[in-house]
Image (cartoon, grey):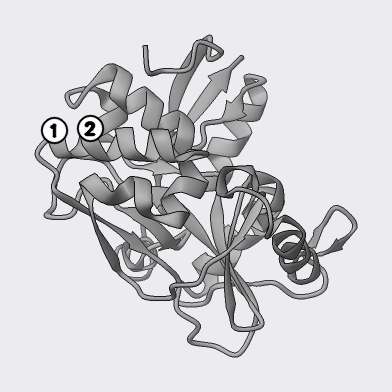
Amino acid sequence: MLFSPKIMESKIYYSSFPKCLEKIAKHNQKIGTTKDLMEKRMEEGLKSRVCYSSFWLPENYNIIDGKLFLSLQEYNPLILYSKEALNNSLRNIFDPFILNESIQLNGKSASQIIPEIAEEDASKRLYERRVLLCEEPETPRFISSKSLGENEEIIFLARGEKLAKEYGEFLFNCGIKQTAIYKPLQLINENFTKGFILNGLVGGKINSSFKGNSSFAQISDVFSELFFGVERIPARASMLGISE
């Protein structure tokens, strides 16, 4: 069975990023990672909800001093500062969440510790690293499904070449010949962070894309209130909660 036997039970939550985190914490679960979602999708198959839905991921991209870093949950500032990031997006959907000195991880500023961990882990194998310094800023980066096992960022997220390759073969067998990685662009001269969504397999020409440039609010959220008097509902996606 491709789905990890350590995962006893899982549940899908659908809401804004902060609300999903609250629900998962309330049920004493952990956030489903990219690796977990890949395994779950292969286990349940194309017609399952886990394949149809798009999911918030605990991993994310951070741009610091002009360099792009891909972080696991432990070094994702949006986990601890999700509400602040959401409020920032609702004030201006085009503004990324700035990593100023007040944004702390493990007693240090996020802008300091993320590059430090990337350097500390640089000699380790990809799937053992906690933060990856990304060499290719190209976005979107289109990737053949059959070559996912050769992409450093996908191997990092899958926590190994084997699963990255298997997931690519799964996509190919589902009729998805190509996927893409969307990375944030440095359009401002400040350090910042963005949300990460793994898209569903249904709909659109590029399915199961890795959207590492995701915002916590969308234009429609703002327009709902400005033009229709409807309370803003922040950008929503699913999140996988896992009981171990």
In this view, the residue in front, 150 or 156, is 150
In the picture provided, is 42 more to the left or to the right than 80?
A: left
Amino acid, disc 1: Asn
**What residue do we see at 66% from left, 82% from top?**
65
In the picture provided, is 73 more to the left or to the right than 185?
A: right
Q: Quadrant of residue 29?
A: top right
Residue 99, percent from left and from top: 70, 72
Q: Are marks 2 and 1 in contact (CB under 8 Å)?
A: yes
To which residue does mark 1 refer? 173
Mark on residue 170? 2
Residue 68, percent from left and from top: 56, 72
Neighbours of disc 2 within 10 Å: few (<14), some (14-19), many (20+): some
Amino acid, disc 2: Phe
| Label total for image | 2
What is the residue that sits farthest to the bottom in this orientation? 189
Residue 187, percent from left and from top: 48, 86
What is the residue that sits farthest to the right in this orientation? 107
Q: Quadrant of the C terminus?
A: top right
In the picture provided, is 62 more to the left or to the right than 75?
A: left
Q: Quadrant of the N terminus?
A: top left
Neighbours of disc 1 within 10 Å: few (<14), some (14-19), many (20+): few
Mark on residue 54? none
Q: Is residue 139 above or below residue 189?
A: above
**What residue do we see at 54% from left, 21% from top?**
242
Q: CA distance from mark 2 to mark 1?
A: 5 Å
Circle 2 — which element?
A: helix
In this view, the residue in front, 119 or 19, is 119
Q: Does the image show residue 16?
A: no
Q: Is residue 227 above or below residue 195?
A: below
Q: Does the image show residue 124?
A: yes
Circle 1 — which element?
A: helix
Q: Is residue 2 above or below residue 56?
A: above
